[in-house]
Amino acid sequence: MTVSQTPGPPEAITIAATNLSARLGGRAVLHGVDFTAGPGECVALCGPNGAGKSTLLRGLAGLLPGQRPRPRAVAYLPQGAACAWPLTIRQVAALGRLPHGDANPYAIASALAACGVADLADRRIDQVSGGQARRAMLARALATQPQALLLDEPVADLDPAAAQEIMALLAGFAAAGGIVVAVLHALDLAAAHASRICVLQDGRIVADAAPAAALPAAAAAFGLRYDPEWRPLLRPGQIS
């Protein structure tokens, strides 16, 4: 098993896993997975609960046993990330500077503005809505000024409009030369904003392609029927 965050030019890295297998609680959750994402890519990891998405993301972040993370270059936001202390949103974003050992005000302010919480910077994170707190946690990741963002369900607590805004922000980060790998259950968001959809099922990648090509496999993994002529594209029914 190899997981690498391979340096390229100074401004670019590659996120890769080769033959990655993992067990949790004595159960195999990944089986020899190969995955690569490079600069400019926004990749959605999709699949049902228990498919291995979060474990793959942790492996790509260098957080599985025996791995070494690179916190200055790779920012990781786990599922349900929350702040346990009554910090202000500005202070939460400033935590993203810990890998650099500074409190770069420009990086913090830019992250707050990008996530739409600059006007809440002096509010305590335990006194804002769940969606606003989610944005603050994303601002913490962006304040690191990473080359890659690895995010586990980054829009889970957001309303539809806010989810679209955050996904557009992530797509823009990738378009500017960064790498985004995000676990998503909302296939409509993946189809609209990702450059690739990687579908996991039972600990294996069953599809990895541009959204239009990957959607049939994604639908099947969730037990949905895919019909490109229907709106929405995915609806309950027998898999065809």
Image: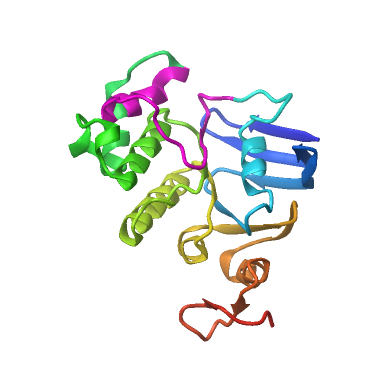
At 53% from the left and 25% from the top, the residue drawn is 71
- Give yes or no for residue 54 being in the magenta stretch: no
At 70% from the left and 25% from the top, the residue drawn is 67
At 64% from the left and 29% from the top, the residue drawn is 63
Report x, y in % for residue 81. 46, 37
Relative to 89, 54 lies left or right:
right
Name the residue at the front extreme: 25
Report x, y in % for residue 158. 36, 53
Quadrant of image for the C terminus: bottom right
Q: Establish if 9 lies above or below 198.
A: above
Relative to 180, 61 lies left or right:
right
Q: Establish if 197 lies above or below 130.
A: below
Report x, y in % for residue 86. 30, 25
Q: Quadrant of residue 54?
A: top right
* Stretch of the chain drawn in magenta: 70-99
At 41% from the left and 53% from the top, the residue drawn is 167
Quadrant of image for the N terminus: top right
Judging depth in this view, the residue of 214 and 240 nearest the camera is: 240
Judging depth in this view, the residue of 28 and 21 nearest the camera is: 28
- Give yes or no for residue 71 being in the magenta stretch: yes
Report x, y in % for residue 146. 47, 31
Tell me, what colour scheme is on the image? rainbow
Q: Establish if 209 lies above or below 68.
A: below
Relative to 70, 178 lies left or right:
left
